[in-house]
Image: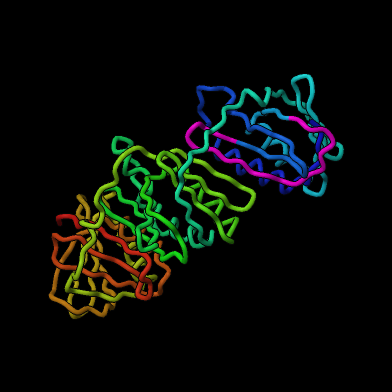
Amino acid sequence: MKITLSRTPLLQLVQRCQSIVEKRHTIPILANVLIETNEDGIAMTASDLEVGIRSHVDGTVKESGSITVSAKKLFEIIRELDAEQDVSLTTGNGFMSIVSGLSRFRVTTQPGDEYPAMAEQKDAISISMPGNALADMIAATSFAMSMDETRKYLTGTLFELDDQQNFRLVTTDGHRLALSELRLQQAAGTASCIVPRKAVIEIRKLCEENQGQIELLISERQIRLIAGSNVLTSKLIDARFPIYQDVIPVNNPDIARIERTTFDQILRRNMIVANEFTHDIRLVFSDKGLDISAHNSEQEESEEHIAADYSGHEVAIGFNGRYLRDALGAIRSSAVCMELKDELSPILIRGEDDEQSRYVIMPMRI
């Protein structure tokens, strides 16, 4: 193999692939990336056997070939090279020569045919949508994925397409739920799958880079994203997602409208003295507005008032302040609406002018 490439797009390519490579691996070759030449550049592949990515970058190919090389080492070398100088990659006799300007490196390689391939699933449902729209949906929901590996089905995101062309992302950790929904212009069929956390994070990155039309292909055991010259493939979590519809409150009678940024700032201040493990915050809704308070076992306490347009009976509810702040951080509207029933029922939070995303938080006993 002998090829010359521009340094900056090559660095972006290696960085994109390196994020897939597992830092701890039992199969040594999975610490590598696969580099293959094509007519107008190289295709680079990385995989951890669960999630894989294949991306392309243009270059001048003088000799074709296929090898694997350490992802970490290649990234660190390319990162330190002069951004204005082209990079030449030449392979032979089990080594790769990396030359840029007056810099020269030689690193070991392994044969490309030893790199594991991820099989493509057939009979996939195709979903086409703007990349920036999918990135926004992930940003609105990913924070509520569970970190509890004993409940694997909660550690990912539900991707769901119904027969009315409504596409949803749903996440929950058992204490809160986040949902974002988009009506697609065209889609055929229905789909429902749980995408692992790592794949969700990588899908968001690729969609932020490729804000034009992207395509999702969902099959029985696999999801595939095609975004520009990038193809990301991931296995699915083999489990059933909870029946989330039963958790979302419907027609909660009492509604509070609150300025989002001020509300978030007050929560942040009060959480300074809240219990460091439970982060419990007390909210009292009344016709006078909203009173927010916190205390801890050392008898430290805080209290603050915020103006709120509230229609309903007076009610005091306890919440994990971190859950509230996560929801507020995902909402882009200047004001939020909080729909509540009583101190024991879940609360529904949404942006004042946003019908796409909704958040449900379970209360705490206070």
Dominant secondary structure of the residues highlighted in magenta in the image: strand
Asked which quadrant contains residue 250, the reply is bottom left
The quarter of the displayed image where residue 247 is located: bottom left
| x and y, in percent, of residue 84 in the image | 81, 49
64 is higher (above) or lower (below) than 28: below
- Write the residue at 54% across / 44% down: 232
Picture quarter with the C terminus? bottom left
Please count the marks in the image.
Answer: 0
Answer left or right for 173 relative to 57. Answer: left
Indicate how the structure is coloured in the image.
Answer: rainbow
Q: In this view, does 320 lie to the left or right of 45?
A: left
Magenta region: 46-65
The residue shown at (19%, 79%) is 311
Which residue is most to the top?
93
Q: Position of residue 233 (x, y in %)?
A: 52, 41
Asked whether 179 or 74 is in front, the reply is 179
Q: In the figure, is residue 121 to the left or right of 327?
A: right
Q: The N terminus lies in which quarter of the figure?
A: top right
Q: Compared to 285, does 172 lie above or below?
A: above
Q: Position of residue 213 (x, y in %)?
A: 57, 60
- The answer to whether residue 23 is above or below residue 311 is above
- State the residue at coordinates (54%, 59%): 131
**206 or 304, which is in the foreground?**
206
**At 82% across and 42% down in the image, what residue appears?**
60
Out of 112 and 81, give the one closest to the viewer. 112
**Is 50 one of the magenta-colored residues?**
yes
Q: Is residue 365 shown in magenta?
A: no
Q: Position of residue 91 (x, y in %)?
A: 78, 27
